[in-house]
Amino acid sequence: MKFLHTADWQIGMKADFVGRAGQRVRDERISAGRRLVDSANAEQVEFILITGDLFEDNAVDRVLIQKIADVLARFQGPVYLIPGNHDPVVPGCVWDHPAWRSAGNLFILIEEKPVEIPGGLLFPCPVRDKYSRKDPKAWIKGERGKEIRLGMAHGNVEGLFQDQLDHPIARDAAQRAGLDYLALGHWHSTATYPDSDGIVRMAYSGTHETTRFGERESGNALIIDIGGPGSSPKVKPIRTGVLTWLTREQEIHAPGDLGKLRQDLEGLTDPETLLLDLRLKGLTYSVEKDELRHLEDLIASRFLYARMDSSELLPSPEDNQWIEALPPGILQEAAARLQKMALSGGQNAQAASRALLELYTVAGEVNR
């Protein structure tokens, strides 16, 4: 048995937090779906499992539902889907759309009962509530048979961070339920869970296209190959995403560090598919003002999206040049006093450093 496991497409997500790049992010989620179907056809898998959160919510545009159904209908075999906590089974949900009935190969599984599939049995665990304390796969009896047994569930594996009790799933859930493989959805990073024998029978595929900064090992789908009942599944990740979400924290200690950082960023490949979250910490020097502006211009123009946080970049207390360049009088005197406080190391040193940075920024704006 060979199949593809995917989840958490989150079609319809707004991505407003990346501004004008949001439209590209939304478009790429649909394109990633097409790439996934093309890979499934090329790999000659027998079917596709989608384990929840195909959509961001049940209020997505109806035309978008039709578009995704059309994408999945291009697969040459059956596609089995369960609702997740973002798109649960409720009145008026996305699963009521006629597109699912029009496509002969799409099967929305909204009942907790075994489904016969080529070579085995499939145990779906559809989600009906956004949050729940119930184990979604508790209904599956751990009875071994002569067929390959697969499960589909959407929830939180024990031990993972969660704000609320969220459809809890035990780390040995596949063993308890007598499953050859348990396909999971909910977390956006690819993750596998070996059983007590070291065999991976449970995994998150992760989202098919990275959703936001901070996600690790996302933008994948999984090809699963099982030789027979009780056999060890072969789990092969395939890349389906194209966008790169890069978070970079950079310490600035001396003149020249900003120039080295800029050169590193200039060397990044495929900037048109890269979203950058740049965080600067450390010290800045008056001689580096032009370099800092150059860096700002670079990230604003080169990448699909970029933001730079320099709130923790403080003017070097030892740097007198910019203070001496201030107009004589109250500003220069205030800057000198703040510099002295910052260098003192006392309880007000940090506040003085931040005030010095504000003054430094204002002075820079005036002198532009």
Image (tube, grey):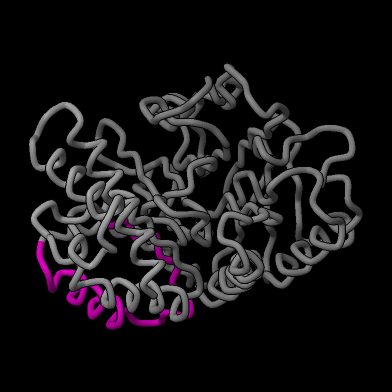
Percent coordinates x, y for residue 322 in the rendering = 21, 65
- Compared across the picture, whether 164 is left or right of 94 comes to left
Residue shown at 72% from the left, 72% from the top: 74
How many discs mark residues in the rendered view?
Answer: 0
Q: Is residue 233 above or below residue 122?
A: below
Q: Quadrant of the C terminus?
A: bottom left
Q: Extreme front residue here?
A: 329
- Specify the segment rendered in magenta: 254-280
Is 125 placed left or right of 310 in the picture? right
Residue 185 lies, in percent from the top left, at 54, 43
Question: Is residue 150 shown to the viewer in this render?
Answer: no
Residue 195 is situated, as x and y percent measured from the top left of the image, at: 31, 34
For residue 166, above or below residue 268: above
38 on left or right of 187: right
Q: Is residue 107 visible?
A: yes
350 or 308, nearer to the observer: 350
17 lies left or right of 99: left
Residue 247: % across, % down:
35, 58
Frontmost residue, 108 versus 10: 10
Asked if residue 212 is positioned above or below residue 341 in the image, the reply reads: below
Residue at 51% of width from left, 26% of height from top? Answer: 143
Which image quadrant for residue 261? bottom left
What residue is rendered at 46% in x and 42% in y? 181
Which of the two residues, 282 or 133, is positioned nearer the viewer here? 282
| Closer to us: 183 or 65 | 65
Can residue 263 be found in the magenta stretch?
yes
Q: Residue furthest top?
A: 133
